[in-house]
Image (cartoon, rainbow, N blue to C red):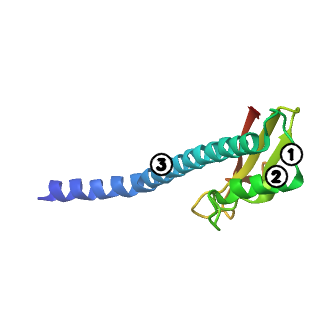
Amino acid sequence: MGAVNRQQGLAVVEFTILLPILLILLLGLTELGRALYQYSQLEKITRDTARFVVNDRGGTTGLLNLSADDIAQAKTLAIGGDGNSQSLLPGLTADDVTITALTDKLVKVEIRYRFSPILFGDTLHLPLFGHGEDISLQFDLVSSSVMRAL
């Protein structure tokens, strides 16, 4: 009976040691999956916005004629999608969207989105213990798309 109790006690100690490591791995994989999903959404938003600009503003001449109202409307589309009042990506604003006419036929849409971990948000930093500034877990996701007016 004594050997069985020692084995059970050893299993509890091993589990206690491994549990934090397994939880960190699980949370890290979850955040990585979330970042990939948000980047995929960002790519889709960028392509759709560029397609909207070139299709709607190309006219029949195939030349772009972008006005400030056109750019504002495209930014609104990028943020709210099909007219919803809430952002497709949390925290995405019009300042994050850049629409540039590269030539009279090419338009570039670039969106810079700040990814923030769901747990702790911007409050958690990895400490370097006096060897520089702490590392923030936030980072920028950048997507750009260039399209030609037809």
Q: How many marks?
A: 3
In the visual, does 116 lie left or right of 69?
A: left
| Whether residue 54 is situated above or below residue 5 in the rendered picture | above
Q: Foreground residue, 33 or 29?
A: 33
Q: Amino acid at mark 2?
A: Asp
Helix, strand or loop for disc 2: helix
Q: Can you identify the residue that label 3 sits on?
A: 25
The residue under the point 43% across, 51% down is: 22
* Residue 51 shows in the view: yes
Q: Amino acid at mark 1?
A: Leu
Q: Foreground residue, 33 or 1?
A: 33
Q: Position of residue 132 (x, y in %)?
A: 80, 49
Of badges 3 and 2, nearer the viewer stands 2
Helix, strand or loop for disc 1: loop
Q: Amino acid at mark 3?
A: Leu
The residue under the point 41% across, 54% down is: 17
User: Could you tell me how far apart the alpha carbons at marks 3 and 2 are, in whole angstroms?
Assistant: 45 Å
**First of labels 3, 1 by sequence position:** 3
- Say which mark, if any, is on residue 141: none
User: Could you tell me how far apart the alpha carbons at marks 2 and 1 are, in whole angstroms?
Assistant: 6 Å
Q: Are marks 2 and 1 in contact (CB under 8 Å)?
A: yes
Q: Can you identify the residue that label 1 sits on?
A: 66
Q: Can you identify the residue that label 2 sits on?
A: 70
The residue under the point 45% across, 55% down is: 23
Quadrant of the rendered image containing residue 64: top right
For label 2, count other residues whose C-alpha is less than 10 Å away and answer few (under 14), some (14-19) or many (20+). Answer: some
Helix, strand or loop for disc 3: helix
In the visual, does 31 lie left or right of 108?
A: left
* Residue 127 shows in the view: no
